[in-house]
Image (tube, grey):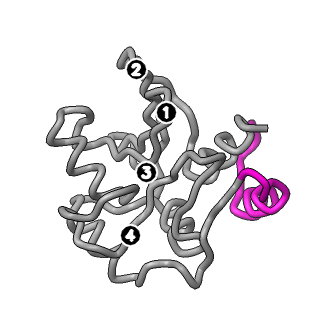
Amino acid sequence: MNEITKNVLIEFINKNENIVNFGTPEDAVDESWILKAEKYLGFPLTTSYKWFLREYRGGEICGEEIYSIYGLDFESVNGGDIVYHHIIDMKNNIIKNTQLVVSQTDFGDVYYFDYTKFDNGECPIYIMFPSAECKFYATNFYEFLYKRIKDYL
């Protein structure tokens, strides 16, 4: 697959608004919440994911939630807050500290950033199947969103 850029992704999202339900920049959390999330997690969020938070805040692709930052206390917030899910997933030994889950399907597939491969502001996203088998999925968050949308077409 050719590299998916931010502009290619925006155009693809706009063409597929019938299955994509994202927020807007007006919905985005304050920049301080991104910094709080990074501090709490102990590592920086990727450049492409931070763009998503600023541009769309969060949302769903065909009902599948893409985790975001809700702007509420990480330990007590519910729903699709990425830091909350990291806390819960770590407590339940579902993931390692170097894995940051960004979405889960109803079929048990878990998509996560692999921070052992963090480089130049980005890291790849892997899919973990219910069998615990993991496979590479996307080079960055732009490609992840593109592929998730494409999977529903």
Q: Where is residue 75 shown, x and y percent of the image?
A: 18, 62
Q: Which mark is residue 70?
A: 4
On the image, which quarter does residue 76 sit in?
bottom left
Q: Earlier in the sequence, mark 3 or mark 4?
A: 4
CB within 8 Å, label 4 to label 1? no
Give neighbour class at mark 4: few <14, some 14-19, many 20+ (Cα, 10 Å). many
On the image, which quarter does residue 34 sit in?
bottom left
The magenta span reads 1-19
Most extreme residue toward the right is 15
Looking at the image, which residue is at 49% across and 27% down?
107
Give neighbour class at mark 3: few <14, some 14-19, many 20+ (Cα, 10 Å). few
Looking at the image, which residue is at 59% across and 80% down?
25
SS label for mark 4: loop
Which mark is in front, 2 or 3?
Answer: 2
Structural distance between the alpha carbons of marks 1 and 3: 31 Å
Q: Where is residue 133 shown, x and y percent of the image?
A: 40, 17
Placement of 18 over or under 129, stated as above or below = below
Residue 18 in the figure: left or right of residue 88: right
Q: Earlier in the sequence, mark 4 or mark 2?
A: 4
Which residue in the protein does label 1 denote?
106
Which mark is in front, 1 or 3?
Answer: 1
Identify residue type, mark 4. Tyr
Structural distance between the alpha carbons of marks 3 and 4: 26 Å
Which mark is in front, 3 or 4?
Answer: 4
Placement of 37 over or under 61, stated as above or below = below
Q: Where is residue 50 shown, x and y percent of the image?
A: 48, 67
Structural distance between the alpha carbons of marks 4 and 2: 27 Å
Which residue in the protein does label 2 denote?
130
Identify residue type, mark 3. Asp
Structural distance between the alpha carbons of marks 4 and 1: 21 Å
